[in-house]
Image: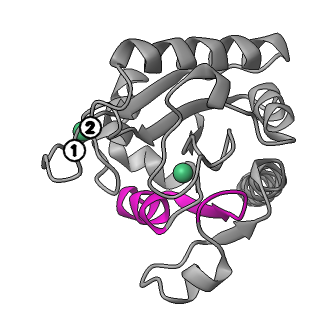
């Protein structure tokens, strides 16, 4: 199964600013190209999971219902362009709550994989796209291929100080989608080559047997 995990703010929609949250629909703006990216990933057969920390709910800045309203609209807009987000996982707890669903912990990723009858092992074939060190750490902790996008909160200057570096850096989700597709093409080529080799060995063995 092809799986992509996406952070939300700064990846799909515009980063609301340091210490700020998307508290209402009016503050949710798709980053240019992100809808295209979601459509392309969907067409390429990827299951798309959004994994996002939304501690603003715990802080009382917006309600769970508001968040759900924003999510419903996001999903509808994505579907309108032919894309599909399989599921959205939010952590709505305080950063100090110690829950398993807050990134960089991988509770949400585990949940997402379980929901598709996959073990954590399959995260190694999945991609994670995020705009912060915490996102990249999450992907790293789960064993995903990580892509850091520069469309959100952090930039290359921040990245210099990170202990864990991303596997790739992309301008935005659309560019990240190119990387994902290229990587996947390479993988399937390698698979094909391997399959060919196995086939040719069998053929040679059969020939030897016959001869
Ligand atoms: Mg973000
Ligand atoms: Zn949580």
SS at circle 2: loop
Counting from the top left corner in percent of width and height, residue 177 is at 78, 48
On whether ligand 2 comes within 8 Å of the CB at mark 1, the answer is no
Counting from the top left corner in percent of width and height, residue 3 is at 58, 38
Q: How dense is the environment of label 2, judged by Cα within 10 Å: few (below 14), some, or many (20 and up)?
A: few
> Residue 189 is drawn in which quadrant?
bottom right
Indicate the quadrant containing the C terminus: top left, top right, bottom left or bottom right.
bottom right
SS at circle 1: loop
Instruction: Report how many numbered discs are placed on residues in the image.
Output: 2
In this orientation, which residue lies closer to the viewer: 92 or 144?
A: 92
Q: Earlier in the sequence, mark 2 or mark 1?
A: 2
Cβ–Cβ below 8 Å for labels 2 and 1? yes
Instruction: In the rendered view, tell whether residue 46 sits above or below residue 181.
Output: above
Instruction: In the rendered view, tell whether residue 158 sits above or below residue 39.
Output: below
Indicate the quadrant containing the N terminus: top left, top right, bottom left or bottom right.
top right
How far apart in space, not on screen, are marks 2 and 1 (Cα)? 7 Å
The residue at 65%/20% (across/down) is 74
Which disc number belongs to residue 59? 2
The mark closer to the camera, 2 or 1, is 2
Instruction: In the rendered view, tell whether residue 179 sits above or below residue 163.
Output: above
The answer to whether residue 46 is visible is yes
Which disc number belongs to residue 38? none
Q: Residue 143 lies in magenta, yes or no?
A: yes
Instruction: In the rendered view, tell whether residue 171 sits above or below residue 40.
Output: below
Magenta part of the chain: 133-153
The residue at 56%/21% (across/down) is 86
Q: How dense is the environment of label 1, judged by Cα within 10 Å: few (below 14), some, or many (20 and up)?
A: some
In this orientation, which residue lies closer to the viewer: 101 or 182?
A: 101
Q: Residue 185 lies in magenta, yes or no?
A: no
Counting from the top left corner in percent of width and height, residue 70 is at 56, 19
Residue located beneath label 1 in the image: 94
Left or right of 30 on screen, residue 146: left
């Amino acid at each position: 199964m092809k799986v992509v995990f996406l952070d939300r703010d700064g990846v799909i929609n515009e980063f609301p600013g340091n210490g700020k949250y998307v508290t209402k629909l009016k503050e949710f703006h798709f980053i240019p190209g992100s809808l295209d990216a979601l459509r392309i990933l969907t067409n390429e057969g990827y299951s798309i999971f959004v994994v996002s920390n939304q501690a603003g709910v715990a802080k009382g800045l917006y309600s769970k219902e508001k968040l759900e309203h924003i999510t419903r609209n996001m999903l509808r807009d994505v579907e309108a362009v032919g894309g599909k987000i399989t599921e959205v996982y939010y952590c709505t707890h305080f950063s100090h709550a110690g829950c398993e669903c807050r990134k960089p912990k991988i509770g949400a990723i585990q949940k997402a994989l379980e929901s598709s009858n996959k073990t954590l092992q399959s995260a190694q074939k999945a991609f994670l796209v995020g705009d912060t060190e915490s996102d990249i750490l999450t992907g790293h902790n789960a064993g995903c291929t990580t892509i850091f996008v520069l469309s959100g909160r952090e930039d290359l200057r921040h990245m210099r100080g990170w202990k864990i570096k991303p596997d790739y850096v992309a301008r935005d989700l659309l560019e990240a989608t190119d990387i994902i597709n290229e990587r996947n093409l390479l993988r399937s080529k390698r698979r094909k080559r391997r399959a060919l080799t196995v086939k040719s060995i069998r053929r040679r063995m059969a020939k030897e047997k016959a001869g």
